[in-house]
């Protein structure tokens, strides 16, 4: 490996391990490489940094975060959870299913699995304990929160992948639905098994009166979600516009209809949105510079050449990609990982015949699973703090979840139709 | 080296702690004021972006006339949110990182690692801010404007210089002040 290669691999590895902020690692490595090893004027670094965030598609990120904050601060999210809760009625494991549905909802809204663990973890743990779920089972369910959410639209990692791979975000959103449902069904099956094994009976009689009451109270709460999905797939809005309109709808529902959102709340949600956006998008900007430096040093080309020369079958290639992404996902934030890895993997896998929409789903699911992979998965540490449980209890609960989600990953990886069928059906014209 | 009595040592220790607290108090006060002001400004940018996006859609569908340059303005608002928001994230010491190794290190080692981190942060952001400010000044000199909305381009580029420049200053400030705070907190 050349000196540039070592700099681009070793320097970020050492800085990451030393706990440096991810954007400093990426920007620092790119700056050192540019100054020491290339003749490219440093002004190009700034142009690359600016270009990485100068994208209308990325504007969907602050809008989705704002909509999520508003829905969580008003009673919108709670009303949807109540509706799911009443709807599951006498089913054994209903609290477990409600937890999965709630984490999916929050994960989809916030786009961040660790944030979902922290928020929903504190909210649902008392209910799970009250229904006699053993702590490790609760920990497993709550720590895995958000894995489904990142696949179900709106998904921030999929927006970022869309920008990095130059793929249509609406197509990626459509592609995530069936794999998201596969993971949800498999997680539900795990809950069914665990409730039998541990003798949990948390079902109660279905009360149509209660259900209709919850449905009446929650009808308007579904409006923002209906606008996002209906607007995008009805061809009315782009994802960014839909996210912006969902913010207005959340304010209208919370402020005018449910009357539990004040102007102070809106301001606080906007402040929080700006904070989360900056925290996330500064990495997007720095990763843009880093991947540009990789490209001008022909690293993606070298990786592609090496993989082509290895003459691997598609099955083995996808297996290697999955293993590499799992390891990377256990160490690195999914957004940064997507931005760094996409320019390396996309050309190779496209040449091997993999649909780039399918690759986006594999990558997103993989990196989300990485967040709960021991010993470094970020969600594990967030759960330890949020649930106030020892790590061994969390790990005991996470292991069966990991097995289920890795099985789901294998299905999603080797059944590409799961990811490609819906976008092909919804968008006959690939330019949509 | 002169020997000091136990009382004198105690007195000097208390004086040092008081002085540390006073520096720390002023530091916190400035920090909080800067965070609060920047957060409010950023919140207004977020809300105005949502309103502009909605007005643009309404204009397009209801009045068959979109707002000229709305997308450009929205993009530059996002650039401002990201780079000005970075000031708040840096001040709150909340950048995303992999902190497991730092968390298990001894107090002394942690203070040293954090000091190095803030020094490198100041160096890297200072370097990029210097480039960004040069670009911004050049654009101002050329009078370069955006294609549709006619926005002077030195503004969005200047926001990068400002955000990263402020981050560099904060990094340097933390480099000098924060490790002492870590040690004092651990000692107490």
Image: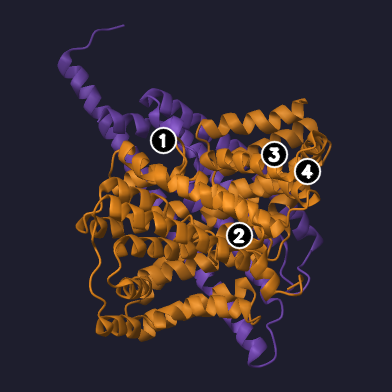
Chain colours: A orange, B purple
Q: Mark 2 falls on what kind of element?
A: helix
Discs 2 and 4 share one subunit: yes
Crowdedness near tag 4: few (<14), some (14–19) or many (≥20) residues, C-alpha within 10 Å: some
Name the side, left or right, on which A415 lies relative to B182. right
Q: CA distance from mark 2 to mark 3?
A: 25 Å
Q: CA distance from mark 4 to mark 1?
A: 37 Å
Q: Chain of mark 2?
A: A
The image position of residue A176, as x and y in percent, is 58, 63
- Residue A212 percent coordinates (x, y): 31, 85
Would you call the spot at circle 2 few (<14 residues within 10 Å), some (14-19), or many (20 or more)? Answer: many
Q: What residue would you read off at disc 2?
A: A158
Residue A344 position by quadrant: top right
State which mark lies toward you, 2 or 3. Answer: 2
Is circle 3 on the same chain as circle 4? yes
Chain letter belonging to callout 1:
B
Q: Which mark is residue A30?
A: 3
**In the image, which is nearer the foreground, mark 3 or mark 4?**
4
Q: Secondary structure at mark 1?
A: helix
Residue B157 seen by the camera: no
Local SS, label 3:
helix
């Amino acid at each position: 490996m050349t000196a540039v290669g070592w700099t681009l691999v070793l320097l970020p590895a050492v800085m990451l391990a030393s706990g440096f902020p991810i954007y400093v690692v990426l920007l620092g490595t790119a700056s050192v490489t540019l100054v020491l090893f290339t003749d490219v004027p440093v002004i190009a670094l700034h142009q690359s940094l600016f270009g990485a965030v100068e994208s209308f598609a990325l504007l969907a990120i602050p809008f989705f975060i704002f909509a999520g904050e508003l829905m969580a601060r008003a009673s919108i999210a709670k009303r949807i959870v109540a509706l799911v809760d009443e709807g599951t009625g006498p089913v054994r494991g209903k609290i477990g299913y409600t937890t999965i549905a709630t984490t999916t909802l929050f994960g989809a809204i916030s786009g961040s699995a660790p944030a979902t663990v922290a928020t929903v973890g504190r909210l649902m743990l008392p209910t799970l304990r009250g229904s006699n779920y053993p702590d490790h089972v609760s920990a497993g369910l709550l720590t895995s929160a958000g894995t489904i959410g990142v696949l179900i639209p709106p998904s921030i990692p999929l927006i970022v992948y869309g920008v990095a791979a130059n793929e249509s975000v609406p197509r990626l959103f459509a592609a995530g639905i069936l794999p998201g449902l596969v993971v949800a069904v498999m997680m539900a099956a795990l809950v069914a098994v665990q409730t039998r094994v541990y003798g949990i009976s948390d079902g109660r009689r279905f009360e149509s009166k209660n259900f209709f009451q919850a449905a009446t109270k929650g009808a308007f709460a579904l409006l923002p979600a209906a606008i996002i999905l209906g607007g995008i797939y009805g061809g009315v809005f782009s994802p960014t516009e839909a996210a912006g309109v969902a913010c207005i709808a959340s304010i209208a529902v919370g402020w005018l209809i449910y009357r539990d959102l004040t102007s102070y709340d809106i301001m606080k949600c906007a402040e929080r949105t700006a904070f989360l956006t900056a925290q996330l998008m500064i990495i997007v900007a720095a990763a843009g510079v880093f991947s540009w430096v990789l490209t001008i040093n022909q690293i993606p080309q070298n990786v592609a050449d090496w993989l082509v020369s290895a003459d691997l079958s598609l099955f083995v290639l996808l297996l290697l990609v999955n293993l590499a992404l799992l390891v990377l996902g256990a160490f690195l934030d999914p957004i940064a990982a997507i931005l760094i890895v996409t320019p390396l993997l996309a050309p190779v896998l496209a040449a091997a015949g993999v649909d780039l929409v399918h690759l986006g789903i594999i990558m997103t699911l993989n990196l989300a699973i990485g967040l709960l992979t021991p010993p470094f998965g970020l969600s594990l540490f967030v759960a330890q703090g949020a649930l106030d449980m020892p790590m061994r209890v969390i790990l005991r609960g996470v292991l069966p979840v990991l097995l289920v989600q890795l099985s789901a990953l294998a299905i999603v990886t080797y059944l590409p139709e799961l990811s490609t069928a819906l976008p092909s059906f919804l968008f006959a014209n690939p330019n949509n | 080296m002169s020997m000091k009595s136990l009382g004198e040592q105690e007195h000097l220790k208390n004086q040092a702690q008081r002085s540390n607290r006073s520096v720390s108090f002023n530091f916190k006060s400035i920090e909080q004021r800067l965070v609060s002001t920047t957060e409010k400004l950023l919140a207004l940018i977020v809300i105005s972006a949502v309103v502009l996006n909605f007005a643009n859609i309404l204009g397009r569908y209801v009045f068959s006339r979109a707002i000229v340059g709305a997308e450009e303005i929205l993009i530059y608002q996002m650039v401002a949110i990201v780079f000005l928001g970075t000031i708040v994230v840096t001040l709150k010491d909340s950048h995303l990182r992999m902190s497991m190794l730092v968390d298990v290190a001894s107090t002394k080692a942690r203070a040293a690692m954090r000091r190095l981190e803030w020094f490198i942060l100041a160096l890297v952001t200072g370097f990029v801010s210097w480039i960004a400010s040069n670009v911004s000044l050049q654009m101002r000199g050329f009078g370069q404007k955006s294609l549709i909305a006619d926005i002077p381009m030195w503004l969005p580029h200047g926001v990068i210089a400002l955000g990263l420049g402020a981050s560099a200053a904060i990094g340097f400030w933390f480099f000098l002040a924060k490790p002492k705070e870590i040690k004092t907190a651990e000692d107490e």
